[in-house]
Image: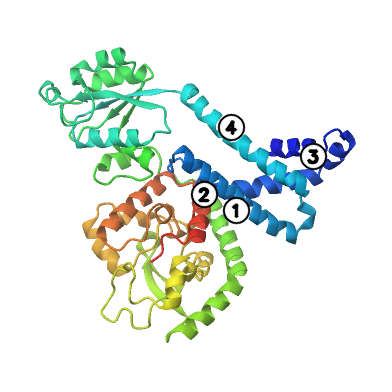
């Protein structure tokens, strides 16, 4: 994009070398170009043009690109009105937009071709022919952005190798054929996807292959890395004990708390005018307190008082605690709007500053629901090993939960967050949260 702007200046001042040189003088032109690039890239981000999980047809990709650049031009127009010193000349701007669009299309096409030919190709062998092996193959197949090919499956026993209709791919033999199958098919990665490994896992051959540099991993780690969640139907207690991750250094915890305080104080200060307006709207809309206080389970199972703007009528839980549902009749008119854009949660900046919550972490649940969920869902209490969050990986990846099944799925995302918790991961979640809030997705 910067190159497109420089070319636009060159075209605009064709034959006028002094005009070109004076226009691109630093730091003025540098600030103008950085603003142009920054705004357009933000629009790309919020239109999912940097999201590998959003795979489009070429025509859809072109439409998203046009929408992003159009939105960027509108935002830049507003910004130029407020800060005229950032304004790029009209001729240079329109030529630059046209050149940038073409350059971005060409760049993306070339990078896609380069990736297909130059990215390190992986040939995968899956040990197993049951449901777990089938799931691994399906998840690998869904990631068309990865240069991965499943060569086939290896049955645990010779008898199982004769049953080939359980998986969509060739069965290359049984465990005793492992070394030959790896050599014949140039395998670079082995995934062990056996529901029961006792007495059938070719451990000696796997050790030999691992020492030779071939990557060997279990199905749970593969599925987790592909989907961003820990599949509870496949995970075993030993995986938590022996897998990488779940580390929390003192530096990470201190940095996380510093981010919490910074974001909490800034968020509270910047949102004060908005909260004043919301408080007035809630007060005028229906009877009851403006700020609703609710007991939630937090760090190490301790309960705390969560703050939020009241979005339901005052007697919403006269019959006891219950899950929120789509089009919940208990939600007020203003409450529906607040929930859609998550504005009802703004008072929780106070919880973050007090240390009840972190800015990023598992969403705190109510004690009544926790008592039920911990009895029905394995590893549920592990989510209480860190402070609950105002936002989190489960919140940005999964819609609002309203039953036990949803709670299971959100716990899978929470466990993935606990395994990979870091400052950079927190920052990525915060960026995703802003996108979701602006789009109004996920609220009930």
Q: Determine the secondary structure under disc 2.
A: loop
Q: Compare marks 4 and 1 and give the one earlier in the sequence.
A: 1
Q: Position of residue 289 (x, y in %)?
A: 44, 83
Give the number of the disc on residue 357.
none
Using the rendered view, name the quadrant where residue 24 is placed: top right
Q: For marks 3 and 4, give the CA distance.
A: 22 Å
The residue labelled by disc 1 is 71
Q: Position of residue 369 (x, y in %)?
A: 28, 66
Q: For marks 1 and 3, give the CA distance.
A: 24 Å
Q: Which corner quadrant holds the N terminus?
A: top right
The residue labelled by disc 3 is 12
Q: Residues within 10 Å of mark 1 (few under 14, many from 20)?
A: some
Q: Determine the secondary structure under disc 3.
A: helix
Q: For marks 4 and 2, give the CA distance.
A: 19 Å
The residue labelled by disc 4 is 106
Q: Is residue 292 above or below residue 72?
A: below
Q: For marks 3 and 2, give the CA distance.
A: 31 Å
Q: Compare marks 1 and 3 and give the one earlier in the sequence.
A: 3
One can see residue 37 in this view: yes
- 2 vs 1, front mark: 1
Q: Determine the secondary structure under disc 4.
A: helix
Q: Residues within 10 Å of mark 3 (few under 14, many from 20)?
A: some
Give the number of the disc on residue 47.
2
Task: Identify the residue at image location x=42%, y=77%.
Answer: 333
Q: Compare marks 3 and 4 and give the one earlier in the sequence.
A: 3
Q: Compare marks 2 and 1 and give the one earlier in the sequence.
A: 2
């Amino acid at each position: 994009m910067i190159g497109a702007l420089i070319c636009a200046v060159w075209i605009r001042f064709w034959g006028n070398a002094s005009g070109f040189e004076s226009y691109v003088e630093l730091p003025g032109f540098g600030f103008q170009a950085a603003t142009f690039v920054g705004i357009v890239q933000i629009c790309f981000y919020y239109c999912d043009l940097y999201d590998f999980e959003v795979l489009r047809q070429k025509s859809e990709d072109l439409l998203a690109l046009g929408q992003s650049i159009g939105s960027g031009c509108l935002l830049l127009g507003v910004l130029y009105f407020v800060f005229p010193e950032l304004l790029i000349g009209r001729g240079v701007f329109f030529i630059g937009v046209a050149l940038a669009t073409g350059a971005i299309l060409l760049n993306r096409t070339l990078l896609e071709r380069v990736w297909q030919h130059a990215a390190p190709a992986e040939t995968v062998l899956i040990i197993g022919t049951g449901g777990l092996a089938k799931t691994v193959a399906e998840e690998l197949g869904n990631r068309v952005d990865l240069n991965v090919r499943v060569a086939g499956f290896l049955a645990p026993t010779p008898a199982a190798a004769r049953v080939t209709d359980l998986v969509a791919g060739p069965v290359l033999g049984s465990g005793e054929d492992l070394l030959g199958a790896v050599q014949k098919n140039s395998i670079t990665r082995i995934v062990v996807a056996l529901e029961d490994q006792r007495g059938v896992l070719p451990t000696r051959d796997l050790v030999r292959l691992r020492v030779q540099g071939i990557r060997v991993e279990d199905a749970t780690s593969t599925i987790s890395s592909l989907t961003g969640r820990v599949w509870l139907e496949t995970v075993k207690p030993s995986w938590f004990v022996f897998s990488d991750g779940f580390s929390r250094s003192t530096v990470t915890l201190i940095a996380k708390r510093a981010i919490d305080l910074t974001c909490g104080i800034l968020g509270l200060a910047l949102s004060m005018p908005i909260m004043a307006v919301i408080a007035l709207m809630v007060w005028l809309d229906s009877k009851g307190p403006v700020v609703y206080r609710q007991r939630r389970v937090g760090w190490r199972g301790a309960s705390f008082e969560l703050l939020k703007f009241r979005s339901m009528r005052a007697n919403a839980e006269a019959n006891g605690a219950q899950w929120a549902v789509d089009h919940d009749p208990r939600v007020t008119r203003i409450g529906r709007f607040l929930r859609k854009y998550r504005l009802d949660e703004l008072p929780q900046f106070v919880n973050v500053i007090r240390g009840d919550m972190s800015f990023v972490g598992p969403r705190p649940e109510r004690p009544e629901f926790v008592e039920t969920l911990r009895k029905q869902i394995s590893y549920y209490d592990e989510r209480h090993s860190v402070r609950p969050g105002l936002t989190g990986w489960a919140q940005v990846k999964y819609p609002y939960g309203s039953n036990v099944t949803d709670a299971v799925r959100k716990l899978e995302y929470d466990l993935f967050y606990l395994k990979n918790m870091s400052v950079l991961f927190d920052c990525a979640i915060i960026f995703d949260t802003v996108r979701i809030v602006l789009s109004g997705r996920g609220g009930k």
